[in-house]
Image (cartoon, rainbow, N blue to C red):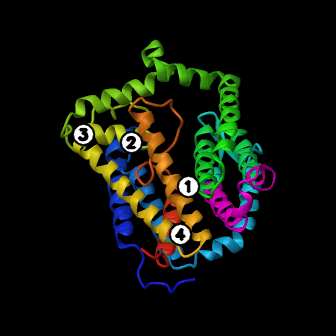
Amino acid sequence: MTQKRSTPDFILVILTLLLLTVGLIMVYSASAVWATYKFDDSFFFAKRQLLFASVGVIAMFFLMNIDYWTWRTWAKVLVIICFFLLIIVLVPGIGMERNGSRSWIGVGAFSIQPSEFMKLAMIAFLAKFLSENQKKITTIKKGLFPSLGLVFLAFGMIMLQPDLGTGTVMVGTCIVMIFVSGARISHFVGLGLIGIVGFAGLVISAPYRIKRITSFLDPWEDALGSGFQIIQSLYAIGPGGLFGLGLGQSRQKFFYLPEPQTDFIFAILAEELGFIGGSFILLLFALMLWRGVRIALGAPDLYGSFLAIGIITMVAIQVMINIGVVIGLMPVTGITLPLLSYGGSSLTLMLMAIGVLLNISRYSRY
């Protein structure tokens, strides 16, 4: 392993903290009305987000100083723990149900979402497998099936909650990792066809998923039902124009767009800060992707490269899906916007993952 530098990627640190700061401001702006109505405290969600952010930043700086090879050593244990959590979250009385999904485990006044932590554990484990079996990845029996088998087992456990959005991010991230490790394109074509059939089966098996697809294609067909969120999101983005209505001046957060501080926070941001503000956020994410790819390419070993590409791919997929949903290009999935959306598990997990990426950057040759 190459000698460790004294400082991590400074640009990535600045981008992370800048996005986190914007997220804290927008969580307050988007949630103040709803928080005042429900909790008589306009800062209710903002204070909790600040707490989550503080814990996440501490975890990020802690992991930034922990040798990333530690994740290789403990990858198997972490995956086993996450599988155990995915099992117990399904147990009535332990798992908490929200919006039709049993995805949370209550811890005092707070809750954790095991599926979020499975994403990072699976990335660490798959990076270990691929770095140790790269020559076998071109074969189906010894390379492709063993790597994908565990991924789809985890996906199946997540779907029992059900949580199609988080499962899709995990599977998409792992497929990218396997592809860049040298897997044959012909194998991916065959698996892709199987995946399309399987995805169609998942959609057909649940009526609410069919409604999400139809509402995505024509949200005005059921404007007060399945298409409501997308329509209200577009009503937020449209009036924002070039420069926006001004910070704090959103109209859609007045009980039109449900829980705007979570998955649809970008709609409020675009309404208040306009096309310029939205483009600035996308630019920050693009720069983060650039730094992550540079770190992956410059990593001193295969494990570091696969781990880095897995982390930055997870971020990129979440951003693409979330923005796609908000602007009406994708069906509603329930995916948060990294570092901006309200949420304890998702925010903490993302900052932890960036901490690991920053540690890799201390060894990266670029």
Select label 2 or label 4 by which is in front.
4
Cα separation between marks 2 and 4:
26 Å
Cα separation between marks 3 and 1:
29 Å
Cα separation between marks 2 and 3:
14 Å
Disc with the residue nearer the chain's start (2 vs 1): 2
Label drawn at residue 275: 3
Badge 4 element: helix
Q: Could you say where residue 188 lies in the image, as x and y percent from the top left?
A: 65, 43
Few, some or many residues within 10 Å of mark 2 (<14, 14–19, 20+): many
Select label 4 or label 1 by which is in front.
4
Disc with the residue nearer the chain's start (4 vs 1): 1
67 w.r.t. 274: above or below: below
From the viewer's perspective, tell me whether residue 62 is left or right of residue 26.
Answer: right
Can you see residue 139? yes
From the viewer's perspective, tell me whether residue 102 is left or right of residue 355.
Answer: right
Q: Quadrant of residue 157?
A: top right
Q: Amino acid at mark 3?
A: Phe
Whether residue 111 appears in magenta in the rendering, the answer is no
Give the residue at the far top of this rendering: 221
Q: Give the labeled residue for mark 4.
A: 356
Disc with the residue nearer the chain's start (2 vs 3): 2
Few, some or many residues within 10 Å of mark 4 (<14, 14–19, 20+): many
74 w.r.t. 243: above or below: below
Q: Amino acid at mark 2?
A: Ile
Cα separation between marks 3 and 4:
32 Å
Q: Give the labeled residue for mark 1.
A: 345
Disc with the residue nearer the chain's start (3 vs 1): 3
In this orientation, which residue lies closer to the viewer: 318 or 269?
318
